[in-house]
Image: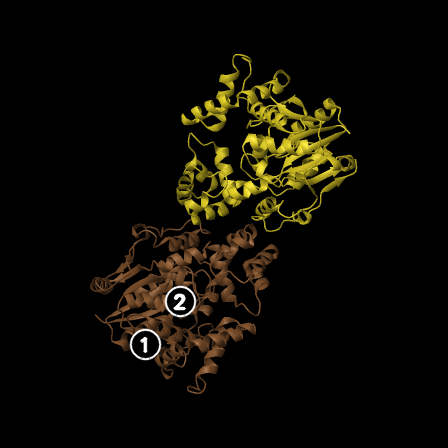
Chain colours: A brown, B yellow
Amino acid sequence: MKAVGIIAEFNPFHNGHRFILNHAKHKSQAEVLIVVMSGNFLQRGEPALINKWRRTQAALANGADLVIELPFTAATESAENFARGGVQLLHDLHCDTLCFGTEDGDSIPYEALAVFYQQETARFDDLIQERLAEHYTYPNALTAAWEALTHDTWPNINFRQPNILLGLQYAIANQLGNHPMQLLPLNRIGAQHSDEHIAHEAFASGTAIRSRVLEGHDITAFIPENTQQLVTEATKHTWADYWPLLHYQLLLQSPAQLSLYHGISEGIEYRLINAAKKANSFSEWLSLVKTKRYTVNRIQRMALNILMQHTEADFQLQQQKTYHHLLGMSTTGQAYLKQSKKTRSFPVVATFSKAPPGYTFVDEKATALYQLPFKKVSANDYTHPPIRIEL
Amino acid sequence: MKAVGIIAEFNPFHNGHRFILNHAKHKSQAEVLIVVMSGNFLQRGEPALINKWRRTQAALANGADLVIELPFTAATESAENFARGGVQLLHDLHCDTLCFGTEDGDSIPYEALAVFYQQETARFDDLIQERLAEHYTYPNALTAAWEALTHDTWPNINFRQPNILLGLQYAIANQLGNHPMQLLPLNRIGAQHSDEHIAHEAFASGTAIRSRVLEGHDITAFIPENTQQLVTEATKHTWADYWPLLHYQLLLQSPAQLSLYHGISEGIEYRLINAAKKANSFSEWLSLVKTKRYTVNRIQRMALNILMQHTEADFQLQQQKTYHHLLGMSTTGQAYLKQSKKTRSFPVVATFSKAPPGYTFVDEKATALYQLPFKKVSANDYTHPPIRIEL
């Protein structure tokens, strides 16, 4: 069976996502659609608005055949590690095509750019370091390096569009892996990823939809009908719910303890603690910590690693224990899993309680943490089986 | 100046406490009354109902001349360490008399019993170990040892009265120290320490008063008039307020991590974690953890050390850094402090922000933790000066 893969967050699942799923399957002419989806914590260093099981149901209801969880140690990382983690899982599943949404879709030579990056990595690194020394944020330094180094050959690429950089990370990771996929960039329609305002009639960005949900506005126009109940009835999770726990960690731990957590370095730990002594809310803390050098997303990722008590040692350990956490599957997806059994290297875990030892401890922590502020949570992730649909 | 000392919790300050303060000064004929008072966390492993500043004000308003904080590392320990910590501070202040409330007051030969214990420590230890092996709780094993070993010489002492064992710990610690005080046991009146019901008209136990306060009943009959406002207007702190933070620690930390905390050993960490996976409240967790072998107080002390992230290493470090945290003083108390300056070994700390390095970090954590569940706390302990009264 031919398979097409997508790496996604679905925070929450909306019409734009359905559009991409449909087109991915249609354009790739694949029989199986694999989604690698972030769990309960996301790339911007924040909790998913809605838990992963509901988001899995939405994906299955709209064309996904397999939903595999992108582990915490990839899902909450920089674009580079996020892309590498997702691509790695798709490679292991022998997926044929990787589809991703992008701006200026078809006109960008992703493969060629990835090859160029491979050849010129040293120059990229030098230039990025120069820009960082000038207090650029990392994403801005990276953009600047792409602009400077590719300008002669490809003068017309707008690297400032956020999904282009992510697409490049996919292309680079894909090239490095052991089973490169064909790339299928698709033009995003209707809205930029982070647009806060809703412009198009039926397509709105995740950011805009999240704002509307939290403000109690109607979002039914922007979400597939078969998914609306999953969103409206869900418990909504935001950073504000986890702030008391983060505050506790920041006030009780010493700078030396904080610096053991993944992503905390360069003395930022002192700044994080001092801000916590003054702040009474997450947003207040964030605005006290923010500097020219650190993006909000990067600070949120630091906060998340502190909240998760996720040490650098645990991060490194987890790198040796890659696995597929199966969140959901259709009958087709199940058949594909069976077929790909012999060629896979990573174990498939159907429920955490049956995982091989040492593989799932970080994601089990993420699961416990996500539920913690909400007393009554119906499903215990530790024993939650994959969601199945007949298709 | 002659000084009399008392070691107390004042949780909250009530008529029985005023009675003891008055009699201590009167019977000892001392000019200065020193109170060594627990801070915001107490010997039963629970938060003080009312913060230490309000309790200090109550003590000063009812006869205390100096209020010194018993540090976290003594205040939240077994009776033995609690007594040793308090007595150590009074010795350093060259206090002349130690007064304590007890049952069967004057009839018990505390000094003689302490001497006997010193001579027979090995036999005590053996007997205690035997009883522990039979799954006695530690307090019961200790009581049994006292009963067995003293029966021939002192057949009429009822060691099951809780304050007698505490009095004995004071007597033993006093004998070991470098400046032994005269002992002045005083009969407690009206109520046993832990009586839940209120029998006597004006004297009720701390336990009974706390229950009444939390149930919203009137307690003015049991509290000195000059102290009532301090109690009624105070924010009330209970374990329930800290449960979300404890729950977080128990669900996110591994058994190996928990076992680094002071007082967690013998594999109890597995039991603590498993109970946390099922419990939705502190009391539910406590009842799941409880066994014949561990008293509620001991489990609460474990819980407190986990909540405080108080490692065995920190506990040991703090033992080398004993200090006097000055919570309050009268003019007389201030004069006494000045007079005792030359003979003291431990530094006097007026505010944490001016403490010598390394002395106050545990108590600063306790301070931050105590305030954490309550967004708006008026006084910042880090810079709070001692309370002064003119007397």
Q: Position of residue A78 (x, y in %)?
A: 44, 67
The kind of residue tagged 1 is Leu
User: Is residue A384 placed above or below A13 in the rendered structure?
Assistant: above
Characterize the local packing of mark 2: few (<14), some (14-19) or many (20 or more) Cα atoms within 10 angstroms: many
Which residue shows up at 57% across the image and 63% down it? Answer: A289
- Looking at the image, is B258 positioned above or below residue A350? above
Residue underneath mark 2 = A82
How dense is the environment of label 1, judged by Cα within 10 Å: few (below 14), some, or many (20 and up)? many
**Residue B67 can be seen in this image:** yes
| A312 relative to B13 in the view: left or right | left
- The quadrant of the rendering that contains the C terminus of chain B is top right
Residue at the image point whose x is 54% and y is 54% from the top = A256
From the viewer's side, name the closer residue of A241 and B289. B289
Q: Residue at x 57, y 32 (%)?
A: B81
User: Is A309 situated left or right of B7 in this image?
Assistant: left
* A313 over B258 or under it: above or below: below
Q: Find residue A41 and name its label.
A: none
- Given residues B383 and B48, the one toward you in this image is B383
Residue A163 at what x, y percent from top left? 42, 75
User: Which x, y percent locates residue A381?
Assistant: 35, 52
Q: Nearer the viewer, residue B375 or A269?
A: A269
Provide the residue designation for mark 1: A183
**Disc 1 on helix, strand or loop?**
strand
